[in-house]
Image: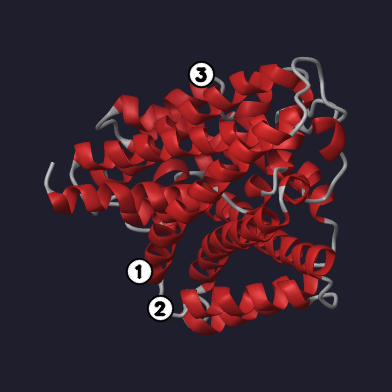
């Protein structure tokens, strides 16, 4: 693999990881809500979701390259038909907007609870950085993640080592947070589903940056990196779960217990994490609205609306909004797998097979061809 190909692999992996590792992930809130309730068995869910991430990302990249799909709307149209794309695309736009203002809400919590800043300061500063990065479009987003992902990984690893050396360990058993769903494998599917709704927005445009093996390597590296990230943070949560349970930002609380300096270093990691997800989410919404408004005007409008709605509690939004969209995201996995397996089947034949197998009701075959 040439030097240029290795760079593309890293760009795909870093952008993918950056789309997933937001404030919910790096704060420990997502891992607490989705996996900590299963105790040590939550590790199985993390391993499983890492495999799902890698395979799902590889499928999106491969299908987009094979069918010359250059945008998320084109990707949805190919999978679901014109009417299906319009319907599902609206749902995804709502999800991306929800994810965007959840990140602004996380910024408010981060700055007000841990720095004593006035209410709304964190969300406003986060919005300014998002605006500055996205003013230049997709290339600025890629550069942002390529720089920040290694920094986040190093600080997370340092926190894990210090925490496991100095903190209490409570092996086995269930945490104080109840399981989200009965089994960890269901939680893993929901977790992958809502994350891939947002990540696919940036994966589709990246599909034309390299050949098949480069795309596959980028997806594999991204899935591996996400698994490693999650396992490191989950181990900290498992070690301190009786102390951190119920906290709005549990991992930042743990960092403060370990060392004051580490708390502020991890504060920067959290802010960088919520910025990466906010950037992807706002980019997705702005590009969806770009057909109605100029890109930069759409970006300003979405940012203003996001700041207005960023008033709800961070932990409440993670536990209620994300699982709903996780189930919705899984709907896209079915046609993606079928499209990859069916190869050059005509669209109407593919839809007929999906309907016959019970994936969609009979009326879907009719409206998706309109």
Q: Determine which residue is flagged by label 3.
A: 357
Are dots 2 and 1 in contact, CB under 8 Å?
yes
> At which x and y percent is residue 360?
57, 30
Identify the element where label 2 is drawn: loop
Q: How crowded is mark 3: few (under 14 residues within 10 Å), some or many (20 or more)?
A: few
Q: Residues within 10 Å of mark 2 (few under 14, many from 20)?
A: few
Q: In this view, does 212 lie to the left or right of 105?
A: left
Residue found 36% across the figure and 32% down from its top: 339
> At which x and y percent is residue 334?
49, 29
Q: Which of marks 1 and 3 is in front?
A: 1
Residue found 54% across the figure and 47% down from its top: 20
Label 1, label 3: how far apart the Cα atoms are = 41 Å
Q: Determine which residue is flagged by label 1.
A: 139
> At which x and y percent is residue 248?
82, 50
Q: Determine which residue is flagged by label 2.
A: 136
Q: Is residue 326 left or right of residue 319?
A: left
Identify the element where label 1 is drawn: helix
């Amino acid at each position: 693999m040439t030097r240029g190909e290795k760079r593309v692999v890293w760009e795909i992996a870093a952008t993918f990881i950056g789309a997933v590792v937001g404030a919910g992930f790096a704060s420990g809130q997502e891992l607490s809500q989705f996996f900590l309730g299963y105790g040590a068995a939550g590790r199985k869910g993390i391993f499983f979701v890492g495999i799902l991430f890698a395979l799902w990302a590889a499928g999106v990249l491969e299908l987009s390259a094979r069918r010359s799909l250059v945008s998320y709307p084109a990707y949805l149209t190919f999978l679901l038909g014109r009417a299906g794309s319009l319907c599902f695309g609206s749902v995804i736009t709502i999800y991306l907007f929800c994810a965007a203002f959840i990140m602004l809400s996380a910024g408010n919590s981060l700055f007000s609870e841990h720095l004593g800043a006035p209410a709304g300061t964190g969300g406003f500063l986060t919005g300014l950085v998002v605006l500055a990065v996205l003013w230049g479009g997709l290339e600025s987003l890629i550069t942002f993640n390529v720089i920040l992902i290694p920094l986040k990984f190093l600080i997370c690893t340092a926190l894990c080592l210090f925490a496991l050396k100095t903190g209490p360990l409570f092996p086995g058993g269930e945490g104080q947070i109840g399981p989200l769903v009965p089994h960890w494998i269901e939680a893993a599917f929901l977790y992958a589903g809502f994350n891939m709704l947002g990540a696919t927005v940036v994966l589709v445009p990246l599909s034309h940056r390299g050949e098949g093996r480069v795309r596959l390597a980028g997806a594999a590296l991204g899935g591996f990196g996400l698994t490693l990230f999650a396992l490191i943070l989950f181990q900290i949560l498992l070690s301190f779960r009786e102390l951190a349970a119920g906290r709005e930002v549990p991992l930042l609380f743990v960092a403060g217990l370990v060392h004051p300096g580490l708390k502020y270093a991890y504060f920067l990691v959290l802010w960088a994490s919520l910025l990466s997800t906010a950037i992807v989410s706002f980019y997705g919404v702005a590009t969806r609205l770009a057909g109605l408004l100029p890109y930069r005007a759409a970006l300003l409008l979405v940012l203003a609306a996001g700041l207005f709605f960023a008033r709800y509690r961070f932990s409440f939004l993670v536990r209620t909004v994300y699982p709903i969209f996780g189930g919705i995201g899984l709907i896209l996995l079915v046609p993606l797998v079928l499209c990859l397996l069916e190869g050059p089947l005509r669209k109407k034949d593919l839809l007929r097979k999906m309907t016959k197998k019970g994936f969609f009701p009979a009326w879907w075959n009719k409206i998706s061809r309109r």
